[in-house]
Amino acid sequence: MRKKERIFTDRERNAIERRKDVRQMYLDGKTPNEIARILESDIDTINRDIIYLTNKGEIQYKYRGETQKMEERLKNVRRLLYIYEKTQVEIAKILGCHISTIERDIQKLNKEGLTQEFTPKEIEEKSYMDECKRKIEDGTLEEKELVFMKRISEETKSYSHMTTYVRACILFDDIQSAISGVKVGIESEQFTQIQKEIFEGILNQLETLKRKRLAKEMLNQKENIEDIMQITGLTETEIKDLSQGKEIPNPFKEGR
């Protein structure tokens, strides 16, 4: 007796066709978010398709953390290459990747036509922050610019923008804002480990500077050394140096 062929519903046929597309794009290296955008589907549906295809042995599933890491790297490569005009070698050094990884990322960006899709806002923000950086160097930056610099650096979480903002805060002795900006950078997923370590070093110096300033104020108010040591965490020698009128140097201003 001839086996009766199964009749698929429209919904099942759509799912079959969609999974074919998902499979091919996933094997081409596209992320679930990219696939969802191209197919105009919701991310939950695409993730279910990926799990289905994985269970069928048609693709090898990438962990979510690995996918997110790749998406962040592509975004950073795109920004560094086409907005900040860094070389492939410079990008590899900044992101802590092998040069071959950066080359593959650039090929992927070119293939998908994502190299020139910069919004006017992105271009305007870079131009503005570059101008602020120039003004820091020549001493013409005005303190009112800090508000706009803070917004841009926190929205973009760009290492370059955040560094410029922190330098501006230090220039105007706004140490608390500088500390807050550095902490945002350290917590950013876009920062490489090397960049985070640089910001951690800056944070330690800024917090030491803040403690010494507090100790100086307490000395001026005739507080005893034991109380100052307990509140600030400074050593007795450090506090005695301050009591003798020694200046509190701002390490970030030296040589500028």
Image (cartoon, rainbow, N blue to C red):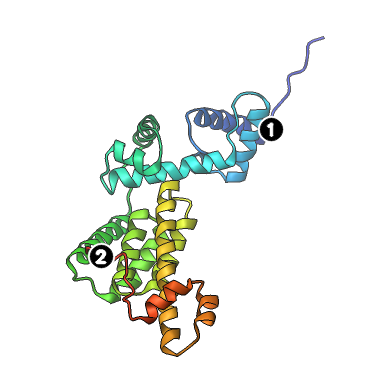
Figure check: 20 above or below 187: above
Residue at image position (43%, 76%) is 239
Q: Position of residue 123 (x, y in %)?
A: 28, 55
For residue 10, say whether it is visible.
no
Say which label, 1 or 2, has the lower sequence index. 1
- Extreme residue toward the bottom, this view: 221
Q: Nearer the viewer, residue 120 or 256?
A: 256
Question: Residue 111's image quarter?
Answer: top left
Q: Nearer the viewer, residue 139 or 254?
A: 254
Residue at image position (77%, 17%) is 4
State the residue position of label 2: 254
Q: Nearer the viewer, residue 179 or 6?
A: 179
Q: Secondary structure at mark 2?
A: loop
Is 125 positioned to the left or the right of 3 in the image?
A: left
State the residue position of label 1: 9
Question: Residue 164's image quarter?
Answer: bottom left
